[in-house]
Image: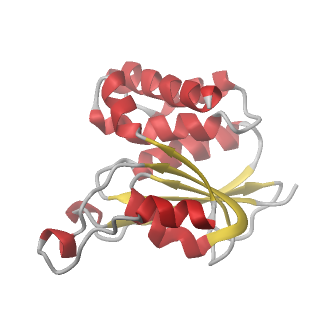
Amino acid sequence: MSTTNIMIVGVGGQGTLLASRILGNALVQEGYDVKVSEVHGMSQRGGSVVTYVKFGDKVWSPIIGQGEADIILSFELLEAERALPYLRPDGQIIVNTQQIDPMPVITGAAQYPADALEALTANARVTAVDALSLAKEAGTSRAVNVVLIGILASQTKIPKERWLDTIRQTVPEKFQAVNLKAFELGYRYAQER
């Protein structure tokens, strides 16, 4: 099996690191060699956060170069657009349609691109979802990450029960119910498309 490269991008505080742990743990339990590399950026200040997850029979390096990502899992529109150069020509983007203004937009030095989603769909296969609404339906706006993991999971050969078990093992017990519901909502969203 060749290596599969997944790039997880978002803004600090959105749970990209938890998403990478859930993804990595599920893949390891399925017997894959997995490498995860976290690039925190200015995560505590709402800055960009990038995580690379590579898996296959044997993975030598955790880094994903430009044009190498099979999938970009993006928690925010502008972050997906920033990551676009890393996507393979036949790659896929799963993106939350939420817009979080970066500091240049907040200070008035720049404007949020009005055509961010159109720029993505013109250049890639895109699954766009209002994951924030699904997370709120699950019980918390902080579960956007697990909604997106549910969408990604629905496109893998990994059994759904493996994903649910991994969430139970990875997420603290007091947050498990809401995260399991968020996963189910994302998984169902993808199945109904």
Q: Residue at x 34, y 33 (%)?
A: 133
Q: Is residue 159 above or below residue 157?
A: above
Residue at x 51%, y 31% (from the top left corner):
186
Residue 32: x and y, percent? 76, 47
Question: Up-down: is 131 above or below 189?
Answer: below
State which quadrant residue 10 falls in.
bottom left
Name the quadrant of the C terminus: top right
The answer, for residue 155, to whether it is visible in the render is yes
Q: Nearer the viewer, residue 66 or 131?
A: 131
Q: Residue at x 44, y 21 (%)?
A: 181
> Residue 88 vs residue 115: left or right?
right
Q: Find residue 20 and report its horizontal and vertical position in percent.
A: 51, 49
Residue at far bottom of view: 109
Left or right of 142: which side holds 60?
A: right
Report the quarter where the N terminus lies.
bottom right
Q: Residue 180, how many percent across, how many down?
A: 46, 23
Q: Quadrant of residue 66?
A: bottom right
Q: Nearer the viewer, residue 151 or 122?
A: 122
Q: Residue furthest left?
A: 107
Residue at (63, 77) in percent of width and height: 65
Can see residue 37? no
Q: In the displayed image of the protein, which residue is found farthest to the right?
A: 1
Give the camera-side residue of 167 and 108: 108
In this orientation, which residue lies closer to the viewer: 91 or 51? 91
What kind of colouring is applied to the model shown? secondary structure
Numbered disc total: 0
The location of residue 110, given as percent across then percent down, is 22, 78
